[in-house]
Image (cartoon, grey):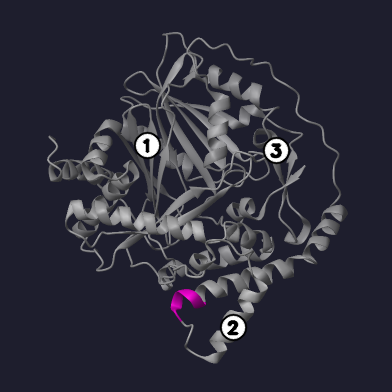
Amino acid sequence: MRQLSGLDATFLHLETSTTFGHVSGLALYSRPSADFDPYRTVYERFEALSGRVGPLHEKLLDVPLGLDHPYWIVDDDFDLDYHVRHLGLAPPGTDAQLAEQVARIFGRALDRKRPLWEVYVIEGLSDGRWALMTKFHHSSIDGGAGVVMLNMLTDSSPDAKPDLTPVPLPEEEPVSETELVRRAVAKLASNPVRSLRLQLRVTQGVVDSLGLSSASELTRQLRKTVRSITRRVPTERSADIDRVTLPLTPAPPSPWNKTITAHRRFAMRSSSLDTLKELKAASGGTVNDIVMAICTGALREYLIGHDALPDRPLRAMVPVSTRTGEEEVPWTNQVSGIVADLPTNCADPIERVALCHQAMELAKRQFELLPADTIAQGAQAAAPVLATAAARLASRLRWADRARILPFNVVISNVPGPRLPMYLSGAQMENYIPVSIVTDGMGLNITVHSYLDRLDFGLIACRELVPDLWDLLDLHFAEIDVLRRAYGIAV
């Protein structure tokens, strides 16, 4: 039995009837032979892993009254047939049909009475390939842990013969509700101190970012008090740490920054990684700069087409892994994020690339200066029952339509994947597209994943807020051509 961290539990607390805390990956595989059975292959892999990998056989145990974060315990009624599912597309089996099926699956919550995962083997694709869609709750697996899981599931050679012998589930001693309450009460005695220190640290950042150092004696005393309580060990960078600009002002409005429904739309398409490397060389920047510029240009054109382009630049939240590689348990969240401007108010494509580079460099410097554990500590101090109630109340009141408080408009992830082919019992993985979370106030998520020589774009959005998601995806690929022409590269 192990307890969820505050950050893990956050992805449970944010869930409502329309916001879900799970993430997915869509892998497309070749069919190595006519008699290859994708479902049996996947079933046997998960059968072999289910006794070895905690997130596959562990379910939630809530603490009475929501006094503390839940625990993971072994599911004594574990049913692999429930978790590994099989379906087929009707002819002709196009990418659009596959994407629609992914959107429908993603728009359903996971059952909290069972281990929080499902996988779907999807056949019937027009080119003879088949797909594997994984669906795991973010409370158990983040992007880094997902890579660990993918490596355990796949082979590095088409001729690999992994050991698929199932192992029994671990045995655990049951824990009484009385013991859970006792542990929670003991932790509550220390939490107020941690919570106060966190609030003072945040206050310090707010005061600094607003430039109120000379506003009044009260402000000066507040800063002095906060720094004395939250003082860090002096370092060579102490002077730099003193000034960190926080994105306190709300991001400008966009069509998808509203209350979402439970319905999703998903769109996907692949590009050549070499194309982006050409643009990288021409611009003198990085592949990530080019990805951000592509997304910026596409969003700009989309907003112009909807007569909704704001004067100020949009802002993106870019997830950042905080994994060190030394974690004792891989199945926990080690993630943070940076906020960067997207120069959607700039008409020149080459200038947009330069501005994207500047924005990302600034965001990364600020991320390095801020305490790495601020988000994790805040999540750890939060009372589960209050966090859950707050999320549900906010959803019920449709806060995203009433107040614009989020400092970013969209999540954009650029995930570097393996450069060597991956296999599943001889079937080669040809594409891998992550599918991530949308929430009230942020109904669009863009993920780009590189694998071999390809770059896979996956866009997911609230179905009602972005009904023309495929058009937005097309604009991303049109922007690639815009950049190629701007840099004098043949289209």
Q: In which quarter of the image is residue 60?
A: top right
Tell me which secondary structure the magenta stretch mostly adopts: helix
Q: How crowded is mark 1: few (under 14 residues within 10 Å), some or many (20 or more)?
A: some
Give the mark nearest the N terminus, 1 or 2. 1
Please tell me whether residue 275 is drawn above or below residue 183 in the rendered image: above
N-terminal of the pair, mark 3 or mark 1, is 3
Q: Is residue 461 magenta?
A: no
Q: Which of marks 1 and 2 is in front?
A: 2
Q: Using residue 92 as the reference point, say whether residue 19 is left or right of it.
A: right
Answer few, some or many: residues within 10 Å of disc 2's Cα (few below 14, many 20 plus, some between 14 and 19): some
Marks 3 and 2 close (CB-CB < 8 Å): no
Residue tagged 1: 99
Mark drawn on residue 222: 2
Residue beneath the point at 54% across and 65% down: 238
Residue positioned 46% across, 60% down in the render: 366
Q: Can you tell which of label 3 and label 1 is closer to the viewer?
A: 3
Q: The magenta stretch spans which residues?
A: 207-211
Specify the quadrant of the image occupied by residue 180. bottom right
Residue at position x 52%, y 19% from top?
155
Q: Distance between the residues labelled 3 and 1?
A: 29 Å
Query: According to the image, label 3 marks what residue?
Result: 58
